[in-house]
Image (cartoon, rainbow, N blue to C red):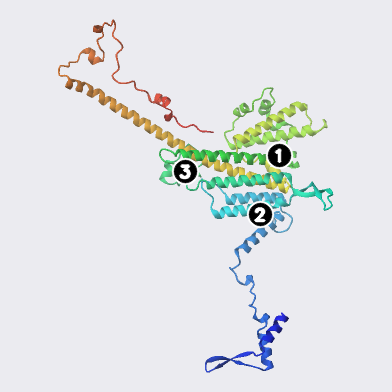
Amino acid sequence: MFHSLSTRQQQQQQPQTLVVENGDSHLVESKTPESQNSDCFTESPVESMPPMISPLTRPGKRPERQQADTELKDRFAKLLLGEDMSGGGKGVSSALALSNAITNLAASIFGEQTKLQPMPQDRQARWKKEIEWLLSVTDHIVEFVPSQQTSKDGVCTEIMVTRQRGDLLMNIPALRKLDAMLIDTLDNFRGHNEFYYVSRDSEEGKQASNARSNDKWWLPPVKVPPGGLSEPARKMLYFQKDSVTQVQKAAMAINAQVLSEMAIPESYIDSLPKNGRSSLGDSIYKSITEEWFDPAQFLSMLDLSTEHKVLDLKNRIEASVVIWKRKLHLKDNKSSWGSAVSLGKRELFEERAETILILLKQKFPGLPQSSLDISKIQFNKDVGQAVLESYSRILESLAYTVMSRIEDVLYTDSLAQKQALLAEADAGRTSETDSESAGSSHSGEETEKLDPHYSKTLLDFMGWSDNSSKGGDKPTKSPSLTPKKLSYLEKLENFNGFRSPKDRH
């Protein structure tokens, strides 16, 4: 600063002063030292700099990026404090806070996916930004692994280096891939106008109501063309359904694996009965412990008509599995957990119960979490497992929702096809009946007009012919005047096109 000041003084040995005379301004030279000093101070860099204005003095003009970063810092602080901003130490664990944050983010972004349509760009950008921010926590969950380091002298030394934990290193990229596949699936429905949605209160919505839509009264009804969807559109829907099904299965497998690795809380164990029979009940316990056991037949014999009954059965079976596993690890036969059942039979019962749990999850993919799952998530302390469980759970839920919306469109398409085929069959029957009646009434009149000597006999009137003159002993079977008419059901059986399409699943 001083160097620039001295240089400027040397260059301005003859300073100029602004003088105003008779309303006109002109520059004059000033050689007094006082004027030189005053000019130097007025032109100093410090005085010539524009005044610094704090962003806080300009309300409403804060950059959006700075505001977004501040919000992210506030949320991160909330996670560190366990959702307790008071600082009183009454918050939940960091793992549960992070799990709740991912769940709440998915609920605010996706909500209830009521239609097959692409996500808006702003919501999609927000989802990608905030989920990456939440997943960035897992980059710092590392473990030590052995590695080799070679020095300049060529000496190879074994050292320990840090690497992301094995389960996170394998599952986080897979879940990100599944996430991108689901968003791409929704984007694939951009520009498809063969099916559309109508308001439930409108006239079209009331006419479009059917048995499937009555079960889901909160969803807008789907409308398709009168003859159903075109073949390319139908193939595209089936392809997207298969793709989403694979995504759901992959997310379900990751979620089940993570939940199985979580520790069972002691509070859940204390709430269990002493044996598996008390947890299952006599009838279910007897069915599982029989010598011959078929899990599919076992489920068919139970009443699984409501979601509450299915969830109650799942809670009972999971409790019995925990009891049997705990007894397998206890060596003291005098313990209160002891039982007269042998270890081999207990392992067999446990395997059967786990098979039932797998079938229940496959048959009812949208089933809520069981008591054991809720207890594991609530008391889990592992941040990495919390991220994997919550991320895979929301992807599984989103995949199930998208698949349900695709099935709604396919179901409406099958109804439209069936109605079109029935209308076509009815029109064909009406036209055949009219043509046959008209042909039979005009055939006799045309014959009489062509042959004036034509006269009807009894045989002709009945449609029989006299074969005795041709040497026949017996008259042949009377030929029918009209071809054999097929019934409506026979037409449906003979022509494949009249058959209603079957559900693929």
The mark nearer the N terminus, 3 or 2, is 2
Apparent side of residue 395 relative to residue 203 in the rendered image (left or right): right
Graded by Cα atoms within 10 Å as few (under 14), some (14 to 19) or many (20 or more), the crowding at tag 2 reads: few
Does residue 213 appear in this view?
A: no
Apparent side of residue 450 relative to residue 218 in the rendered image (left or right): left
Asked if disc 3 and disc 2 are in contact, CB closer than 8 Å, the reply is: no
Residue 361 drawn above or below residue 71 = above
Q: Measuring from the top left, give residue 414's x and y in whole percent.
A: 46, 35
Apparent side of residue 334 relative to residue 177 in the rendered image (left or right): right
Mark 2 belongs to which amino acid?
Answer: Trp
Q: Which residue is mark 1?
A: 260
Q: Measuring from the top left, give residue 180's x and y in whole percent.
A: 60, 47
Report the residue at 48% width, 37% height from top: 411
Q: Residue furthest front?
A: 153
Report the residue at 49% width, 38% height from top: 235
Mark 1 belongs to which amino acid?
Answer: Ser
Decide which of 11, 269 is in the foreground and name it.
11
The quarter of the picture where residue 452 lies is top left
Report the residue at 47% width, 40% height from top: 233
Q: Which residue is mark 3?
A: 221
Mark 3 belongs to which amino acid?
Answer: Pro
Where residue 133 is drawn, which disc sits there? Answer: 2
Report the residue at 41% width, 45% height from top: 203
Q: Which quarter of the figure is the N terminus placed in?
A: bottom right
Mark closer to the observer (2, 1): 2
Question: Of helix, strand and loop, which one carries label 1?
Answer: helix
Question: Of helix, strand and loop, which one carries label 3?
Answer: loop
Apparent side of residue 350 relative to residue 435 in the rendered image (left or right): right
The mark nearer the N terminus, 3 or 1, is 3
Graded by Cα atoms within 10 Å as few (under 14), some (14 to 19) or many (20 or more), the crowding at tag 3 reads: many
Q: Measuring from the top left, give residue 137's x and y in whole percent.
A: 70, 52
